[in-house]
Amino acid sequence: MSDKGIGASVRRKEDQRFVRGRGSYVADMVRPAMAFGAFLRSPHAHATITAVDTARATAMPGVILVLTGADLAAAGVGGLPCGWGIKGTDGAPMKEPAHPALAQGKVRYVGDAVAFVVAETAAAARDAAEAIAVSYEVLSAVIDLEAAIAPGAPLLFDDVADNLCCDWSIGDKAATEAAFARAAHVARVRLVNNRLVGNPMEPRAAIAEHDAATGRTTLWTTSQFPHVVRLLMGLFVLNIPQQNLRVVAPDVGGGFGVKQFHYAEEAVVTFAAMRLGRAVKWVCERSEGFISDAHGRDHVTEAALALDADGKFLGLSVETIGNLGGYISTFGPNIPTNLYGPLLSGVYTIPAIHCGVKVVFTNTVPVDAYRGAGRPEATFVVERLVEIAAAEMGIDKVEIRRRNMIPKEAFPYQTPVMMRYDSGDPAGCMERALAAADHTGFPARKAAAAAKGKLRGLGLSTYIEACGLAPSRIAGSLGARGGLYESATVRVHPTGQVTVLIGTHNHGQGHETTFAQIAAEKLGVAFEDIDVVFGDTDRVQFGMGTYGSRSLVVGGAALAKASDRVIAKGKKIAAHLLEASADDVEFSGGTFRVAGTDRAKSFAEIALAAYVPHDYPLEALDPGLEEQAFHDPANFSFPSGAHVCEVEIDPETGKVELVGYTAVDDVGTVINPMIVAGQLHGGITQGVGQALLEHCVYDRATGQILSGSFQDYAMPRADDLPAYAVSTHPTPSTDTPMGVKGCGEVGTIGSPAAVMNAVVDALSGYGVKHMDMPASPSRVWAAIATARG
Ligand code: MCN
């Protein structure tokens, strides 16, 4: 048993079905008498809808239903709710214009859903959608963030002046200004954090079905949080009592944040199924995903770091404009604010920090969380500034970090921007990463590259992340409109096997394995005898789902708590059977034993006794062995780490080749080292994608998306990447039950800055001080060409 407990690199049990092609995905599902839906989407970035004529589409063969925004409004369908309402510096609530599931009166981005057609086949639905005649009065669009808040900009919403959703800030402005006033040196940067499209391997999909006999509706959807979809859609959009709505998120082929929102399509498909009394299926096409999946990042930032003459950090000032897109998505306003500003201290002692963020509407696809969500952006600002300061002051890049890092013994560490870091050893991670990357051998490798005509650069990045979202009390004070606890039920069967029902959602993170490892370790039950169930509101008690690297820290803690409750009850049953006091019963390795004796009962014997209570303390205990726990964390958990990247650049083509990547991450106690390594690899790859390849580009005049397919949007492929060297450097969290910290996003948080610092280092001979992402061949070549004159 224990060889598959906590700390073991157990192979993922869910892969048994995935590698055999037996996963259960929404797009593959077939329901009786199922009809098919297609959306008509706006071809304009900004336009008034003057008329919608559905007559031709309605008359086409096989068409069953055509819905427009007006139909939904007439039926009393509500707008899509936002789960996080932030407040501005002046205390005023953010501007929260309505977000109808199908556009009403206006369209606000290319891809905005205008109508929905249901037909007997998917092809008939698509044809009919194209036959809907929509008359538009095209308006000027605004794409650029700075243009959006400039005087005279086209306004997306009549009642949102300057397209400004919220003017938010954190930190002490006066103290920061005072720090800058006494600085010996100020390093400055203006940077753009590029817009990304998540592109999970499985596109989004939904099937809804209504059972007139029971009045119950079921939605199968590609979601990271089915209970939250049930809550938001049932309560705010379609007014369905919770007990009559079942939401199932079965196997989901990657989410990366993109599937963490309640989308219009889920509500429209469900509404159509209820109206028709037939199952309705919609599957997003890849190109449709580019203009309807929420996008990520998209910041413009001016930042400055004040230093004393010895290179000690005195203050940090950050002004950012963050893009919300055309409407507020489920968590949109929270990402460039609460998940960004409070992380700007990084792993450094910075006595004064101030960060102002303008959260702005533009005529683009709504922007929300994408793996890392706010924290890669914060890391990028800090680590680019540190690098620029080091270069300008002539201090070695490692040395300047050593001088400013929070020492291991200073944890728990209170930053000036709200966060109280639990534990960490940033210097330990950095020194280990540098040693593993053979930092001292770099000059020789650079010389060897130069001999081949290549430019070689070494980039270092450190980071800290707040994950394990989140303490409900803190989240609530920051504007969260729900709790952020997690729940677990441990159901022990009469035969001693166990089913764990967990509120998180597994879409690639290996929960079926790691949660079984935790239960195996806790209960002494064989790993193979434990089944982990998730993703179905009819089976699982409740759950807030998976995002913010919270599943282990919050969900795993709920599981540990529920397991402890099972053991506590088991001890009472054992005490009765063994004629001892419960206080004298010990439990370990699956055996209940009277301390200091050989009188013992196995876990399976206790389970049987609980369900066949012939000899049982029925006056004191109920039969059965099933316990539930909800866990609300005391604090965020704070993984940290150091990444070292080496690149070689061909100065003639501008092509950047990643030739080495080393990461040392502190994710606290590790449950499954192999799964953690996999998460680090995946995360690093997504950060490398942002740094070198991925860029969602809009035409600024028309608002058309120019990188709307894989022809123009470059995702990283295996041959773009070296073999990574990843390892962990655990300092157990002091605020989580098992000492664990999250690992799902750390790779994406540390890597963009490491890669870009390497690129800039390689180009330093050409006087390049900063480059925006992605460092595409054309951008790098142009920088070299400009320097060469
Ligand atoms: N784990 C561990 N020891 C630790 C930390 C984590 O063994 N100290 C294990 C966990 O038990 C879990 C996995 O590693 O099996 C990831 O755990 P965690 O850090 O809690 O992250 P979540 O499970 O909450 O996953 C969310 C995170 C996020 S926010 C994004 S985005 C993301 C990611 O995970 N999306 C992913 N990783 C992904 N991986 C895949 N394959 N697909 C996605 O969509």
Image (tube, rainbow, N blue to C red):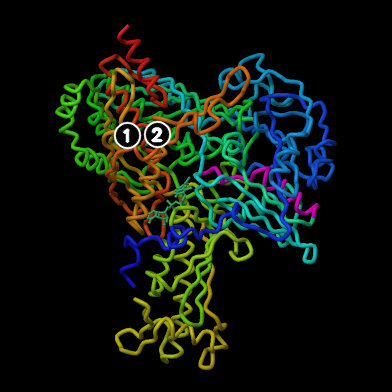
Residue 269 is a magenta residue: yes
**Amino acid marked by disc 2:** Thr
Predominant secondary structure, magenta span:
helix
Extreme residue in the front direction: 61
Q: Please, what secondary structure does the residue beneath circle 2 have? A: helix
- Residue 333 shows in this picture: no
Start and end of the magenta stretch?
Answer: 257-276
The quarter of the picture where the C terminus appears is top left
**Amino acid marked by disc 1:** Ser
Which badge, 2 or 1, comes first in the chain's sequence?
Answer: 2
Q: Position of residue 214 (x, y in %)?
A: 77, 66
* Left or right: 373 in relation to 88: left
Task: Tell me what residue is drawn at x 25 percent, y 34 percent.
Answer: 402
- Dividing the picture into quadrants, the one containing residue 774 is top left
Question: Which one is nearer the viewer's eye here, 551 or 115?
Answer: 115
Given contact means CB atoms under 8 Å apart, are the residues at marks 2 and 1 in contact? yes
For label 1, count other residues whose C-alpha is less than 10 Å away and answer few (under 14), some (14-19) or many (20+). Answer: many
The quarter of the picture where the N terminus appears is bottom left
Residue 13 is a magenta residue: no
Q: Position of residue 200 (x, y in %)?
A: 51, 44
Question: Which one is nearer the viewer's eye here, 676 or 618?
Answer: 676
Task: Tell me what residue is drawn at x 47 percent, y 61 percent.
Answer: 17
Mark number, residue 379: 2
Asked if 636 appears above or below 288 in the picture, the reply is below
Q: Which residue is mark 1?
A: 461
Question: Which one is nearer the viewer's eye here, 561 or 124?
Answer: 124
Task: Indicate if the residue with disc 2 has its beta carbon within 8 Å of ligand 1.
Answer: no
* Left or right: 541 in relation to 678: right
